[in-house]
Amino acid sequence: MGDEKTIKLIFFGDMVGKPGRHVVRDFLLKNSEKYDFVIANVENASHGFGLTEKNYKELISYGVNCMTSGNHIWDKRDIFAFIDNADKLIRPINYPAGTKGLGSRVFECGDYKIAVMNVLGKVFINVVDFQWELLTEEIKRLKEITPIVIIDFHAEATAEKICFAKYCSELGVSALFGTHTHVQTADESIINGMGYLTDAGFCGASDGVIGMEYKTSLARFLTGIPERYEVADGRSVQLNAVEVEIEPLTGHTVAIKRVFCSRDNDKEEDNED
């Protein structure tokens, strides 16, 4: 656990398929006692695209307290059947009103509460509108419940992430982590008491292309013809995450650290789900 005066939280970058789920599982088996709260981006957790209910329950059993997502959250059909009852999962808040699921949740963490919000960027994604007024009002609402507010900003452009982070720091957000590019950046910082990293990276097979099989990725670039992506075989895997320590009474981040580890597996992973 973190220092008694702080809450120690870990956030795992985009989890890609079974290799990603298992490398997070193995990390938490050895390190879970270090953390008071665990968040993971899971929009690629089920064979690289979306999340199944089976994998949702699997990740809860590993000790994940909150799951965030992004533009691929709807890629598995059964998400529509279970997302409204998935009390550890959030989807981007800036989908239209009436969209299934919630864009933010407040979680119990010992004597404290932690609010987590998921936001989808606009630049180069163009799935949803970037509703600044909605996001501002939601941050203010969550701050009335708890001083600890965490945001997963799932976006492509680094400039959009940095600009939104500075804006959120002025509203008293505790930490903002970028996701989506699957490449961990080296710009961890504390901005006005808010922990920040442009992209947390990804958890999964490192012998492919951002978690996916190399030959298929290459063929798409060479020919321009769409082919179905497959998760890389997982014989070599990596884990990207970020740790923060937060003062629970002020909601300020007082320490931030990137996490990166890798290993070779003895046998090839079966990536059926």
Image (spheres, rainbow, N blue to C red):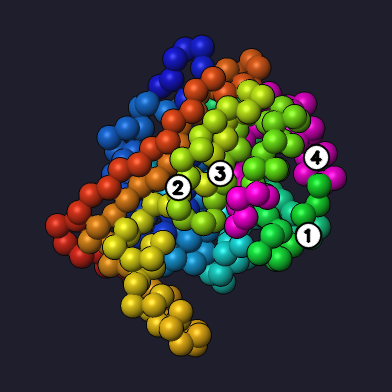
Task: Mark 2 vs mark 1: give the one in front.
Answer: 2
- Tell whether label 1 touches label 3 (CB within 8 Å): no
- Lateral position of residue 89 relative to residue 26, left or right: right
Q: Quadrant of the N terminus?
A: top left
> Residue shown at 23%/49% (left/top)?
263
Q: What whole-number distance in Å separates the C-alpha atoms at marks 3 and 1?
A: 21 Å
Determine which residue is flagged by label 1: 129
Residue that carries the numbered disc 2 in the rendered image: 184
Quick one: quadrant of the C terminus? bottom left
Instruction: From the top left corner, tell me how far across and down residue 112 is, in percent.
Output: 60, 22
Q: Is residue 253 left or right of residue 237?
A: right
Q: Residue at x 63, y 28 (%)?
A: 191
Please provide percent x and percent y for residue 236.
25, 57
Q: Of marks 4 and 1, which one's residue comes earlier in the chain?
A: 1
Query: What is the count of numbered marks?
Result: 4
Q: CA distance from mark 3 to mark 2?
A: 8 Å
Type of the residue with mark 1: Asp
Q: Which residue is mark 4?
A: 136
The first of marks 3 and 2 along the sequence is: 2
Question: Mark 3 or 1 closer to N-term?
Answer: 1
